[in-house]
């Protein structure tokens, strides 16, 4: 029999899993990894649900957990790649991409994990520079300059075919 | 004016990126059964966490109990001064495997970096768990010549190897790197694979992986005893793996029985890599201002 905690968690998870999954996909660029990241994030919330559920900014906390889970995983993968335990190119999700999607996701994939997280949090989650800085443990100036550089790099990657190029 | 144009460009760029992100994620298929799987994984996490806390409490109690049993009675006439002898806090072979801690009395002029403020209990347990697993990889993956491994109490990265020939200081250090300019060690700019003789020591820069270069040292001390080590940068940390004579132990110092190649082979083991990566991600040592990872 499920307790009150579990029911309350399921209610929260049902309402937030799609949003977290979308963010996870933008962070990692792979549907399977995005599912794993979302599942791990929700599992971490569940494991401490009694405390977590009392938080004032629960959604913000969930985003923090997701981002840190992603960055942790990125670093583990980078180390594994360096030591030859993982293929050097990240996987893609075949058969579901339009041309534009491949282009934007490929351009995002070229960014280092941290810069990518900044772009996603700043432009997708619409978090303020200060909030992103707080979440990633860096200064607002770093977020500003990294995002600016990332946008320039995206523009370069997307090239002339994108409407962004004419901005 | 230029700044205004730049801001406008940034805003337009951001709007475009957001629009594209929205279009991309709208097309994603709905994940099925995520919540149910998360609940299952969350239950396992809860259980593991409870077991870990329970296990740590049992280990701590066992260590405390066994440590008390091994404490020597106060020697009459010693006056309580002078360095205390080594104390074995617990015996090996307990189940689950717990590596004992060898306590060394503080020196007259302790290292200021050691006088850190008391850490919270959860953090202390995390570091203890990391050290236990580090001791396990040292014992399991280094050649048997390093003897019986125990944790040394005076530094988080130090372990004791007790052999018939004497004592060894085994260092398993993954420490946050603070950039203090280019490393100025003798080998930091030498060609890969070329040995450089520095007095009675030899260093060599090697290619550990495609993107990681390491520096190995085989050094001779004044008493003719050897130390062997490998150091490299990993992520945001400096890694130092070394085997040295240990002069503060009861058995007297012994030469490193390992070649630098054996230490390099140890550094390449997946279990070691995973542990170093964990130490890089969740440091157990304080950051250092001056890098020793490239110097001897």
Image (spheres, coloured by chain):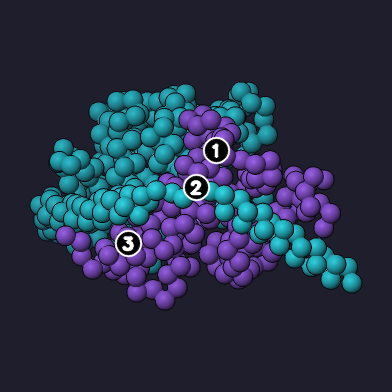
Q: Are marks 2 and 1 in contact (CB under 8 Å)?
A: no
Q: Are marks 2 and 3 on the same chain?
A: no
Asked whether residue A143 is in view, the answer is yes
Look at the image and give the colour of chain B.
Answer: cyan
Q: Where residue B257 sits: x, y (%)?
A: 37, 25
Q: Residues within 10 Å of mark 3 (few under 14, many from 20)?
A: some
Q: Which mark is residue B148?
A: none
**Quarter of the image that includes the N terminus of chain B:** bottom right
Q: Chain of mark 2?
A: B
Q: Are marks 1 and 3 in contact (CB under 8 Å)?
A: no
Going from the N terminus, do you reach mark 1 or mark 3 first? 3
**Residue beneath disc 3:** A10
Q: Are marks 2 and 1 on the same chain?
A: no
Residue depicted at x 39% and y 73%? A55
The residue most toward the right is B1
**Residue beneath disc 1:** A93
Q: Chain of mark 3?
A: A
Q: Is residue B290 above or below residue A89?
A: below
Query: Which chain, by letter, is purple?
Result: A
Q: Where residue A13 sits: x, y (%)?
A: 38, 61
Q: Nearer the viewer, mark 2 or mark 1?
A: 2
């Amino acid at each position: 029999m499920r307790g009150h905690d579990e029911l309350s968690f399921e209610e929260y998870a049902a309402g937030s899993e799609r949003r977290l999954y979308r963010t996870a996909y933008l962070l990692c660029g792979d549907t399977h990894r995005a599912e794993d990241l979302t599942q791990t994030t929700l599992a971490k919330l569940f494991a401490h649900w009694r405390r977590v559920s009392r938080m004032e900014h629960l959604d913000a906390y969930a985003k923090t957990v997701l981002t840190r889970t992603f960055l942790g995983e990125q670093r583990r993968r980078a180390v594994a790649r360096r030591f030859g335990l993982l293929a050097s190119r990240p996987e893609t999700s075949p058969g579901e991409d339009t041309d534009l999607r491949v282009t934007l996701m490929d351009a995002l994939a070229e960014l280092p994990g941290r810069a990518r997280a900044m772009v996603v949090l700043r432009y997708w989650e619409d978090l303020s520079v200060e909030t992103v800085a707080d979440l990633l443990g860096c200064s607002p100036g770093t977020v500003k300059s990294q995002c600016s550089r990332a946008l320039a790099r995206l523009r370069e990657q997307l090239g002339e075919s994108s409407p962004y190029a004419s901005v | 004016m230029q700044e205004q144009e730049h801001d406008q460009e940034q805003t337009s760029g951001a709007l475009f990126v957001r629009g594209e992100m929205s279009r991309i994620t709208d097309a994603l298929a709905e994940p099925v059964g995520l919540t149910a799987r998360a609940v299952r994984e969350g239950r396992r996490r809860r259980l593991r966490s409870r077991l870990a806390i329970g296990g740590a409490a049992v280990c701590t109690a066992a260590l405390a109990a066994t440590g008390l049993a091994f404490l020597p009675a106060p020697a009459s006439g010693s006056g309580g001064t002078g360095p205390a002898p080594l104390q074995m806090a617990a015996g090996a072979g307990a189940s689950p495997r717990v590596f004992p801690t060898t306590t060394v009395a503080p020196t007259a002029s302790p290292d200021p970096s050691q006088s850190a403020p008391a850490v919270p209990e959860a953090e202390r347990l995390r570091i203890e768990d990391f050290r236990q697993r580090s001791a396990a990889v040292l014992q399991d993956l280094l050649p048997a010549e390093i003897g019986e491994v125990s944790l040394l109490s005076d530094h988080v990265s130090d372990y004791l190897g007790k052999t018939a020939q004497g004592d060894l200081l085994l260092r398993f250090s993954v420490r946050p790197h603070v950039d203090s300019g280019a490393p100025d060690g003798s080998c930091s700019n030498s060609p890969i694979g070329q040995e450089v003789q520095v007095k009675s020591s030899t260093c060599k820069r090697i290619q550990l992986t495609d993107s990681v270069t390491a520096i190995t040292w085989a050094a001779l001390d004044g008493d003719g005893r050897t130390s062997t080590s490998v150091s490299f940068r990993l992520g945001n940390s400096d890694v130092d793996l070394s085997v040295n004579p240990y002069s503060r132990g009861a058995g007297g110092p012994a030469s490193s029985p390992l070649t630098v190649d054996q230490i390099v082979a140890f550094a390449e083991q997946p279990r070691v890599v995973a542990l170093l990566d964990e130490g890089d991600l969740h440091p157990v040592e304080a950051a250092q201002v001056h890098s020793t990872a490239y110097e001897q």
